[in-house]
Image (cartoon, grey):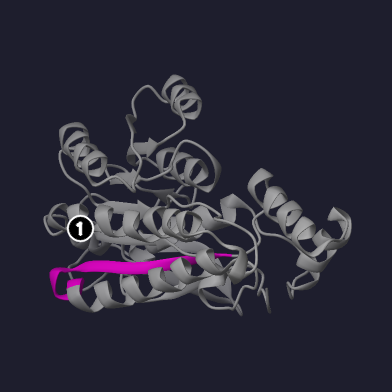
Amino acid sequence: MRNSQGGPLLRSQSTCNDRAFTISDSLLKYQFPCLLLINPMTNEFNLSGLRVLVTAGASGIGRVIADTFATHGARLHICDISDDALNQTAAAHPDWGISRCDVADERQVFELFQAVEQNLGGLDVLINNAGIAGPTGGIDELSSADWQSTVDINLNGQFYCARLAVPLLKQSDNASLICISSVAGRLGYAFRTPYAVTKWAIVGLVKSLAIELGPDGIRANAILPGIVEGPRMEKVIADRADAIGIPYAEMEKEYINKISMRKMVSAQDVANQAMFLCSPLGASISGQAISVCGNVEYL
């Protein structure tokens, strides 16, 4: 079987109800010159040449995203504020671009993008990942400083990065902007108001940018991780348990019971979704807020 341009159609290994799906490899290479979707021998994603910036990419979800993209051939630049995490990442990946950057600081973000241009020569993907959990407490207990710090990092930081990324993304043949929000960006979250407010705002940012940037061929999407296993979530659960005066184990069980699938998700689940959105399989997906959460019902 051949495609409309005369090239052979490659058949994937996936089937659904005994119907095989076919993908035109030559057409994908024509549409996405820096990206070949599937290695026909291994059925793996191949992101060779894709230029990717991941904020807060030296640890946690950001590091897993960066590792996943790099494993599949992408060229990486990451930033973070932890010197230890940056040093460990630099030792593990000497070919990556590494910057120390607090995304809440406009000057540091400007310097970050200077380094990205020098290191990668352009940009195809921005993963706006940097964020903090913010304070835990009733609205009448929160300080203005805690509120402002959460807004500065979680929301303003995404704006600062997107603003400088867009001119570079407009020059790309396969441009994607992914903002990491949270299921708290679609649900109310008592005692975590500053966090929830910023995560709702990120969804609004993405939906607006998808309309604004679509004519330039730039896809904009938000990923909404749910309850992600790991040290950060353990601290969130501990703080919430302290705030309402119950044991950690009881609080953890309450969190699990909020999930329809009764299990936490992993950072790798989030990374896989990001990779999908940046591949040709996600070529027509934009303006979406996609939960990766096992269906968190409430918070």
Which three-letter amino acid code belongs to the residue tagged 1? Arg
- Residue 106 x/y as whole percent: 24, 47
Q: Is residue 278 magenta?
A: no
Q: Quadrant of residue 209?
A: bottom left
| Quarter occupied by the N terminus | bottom left
Q: Is residue 218 magenta?
A: yes
- Residue 207 x/y as whole percent: 32, 77
Q: Is residue 140 left or right of residue 27?
A: right
Q: Residue at x 79, y 64 (%)?
A: 244
Q: Residue at x 21, y 32 (%)?
A: 119
Q: Main secondary structure of the magenta part?
A: strand
Q: Residue at x 19, y 67 (%)?
A: 6
Q: Is residue 235 visible?
A: yes
Q: Is residue 249 left or right of residue 288?
A: right
Q: Quadrant of residue 9?
A: bottom left
Q: Is residue 105 left or right of residue 188?
A: left
The residue that mark 1 highlights is 163
Q: Residue at x 73, y 60 (%)?
A: 240
- Residue 2 x/y as whole percent: 28, 69
Relative to the observer, which residue lies in front, 280 or 9? Answer: 280
Range covered by the magenta-colored residues: 213-225
Q: Is residue 135 left or right of residue 74?
A: right
Crowd around label 1: few <14 · some 14–19 · many ≥20 (10 Å): few
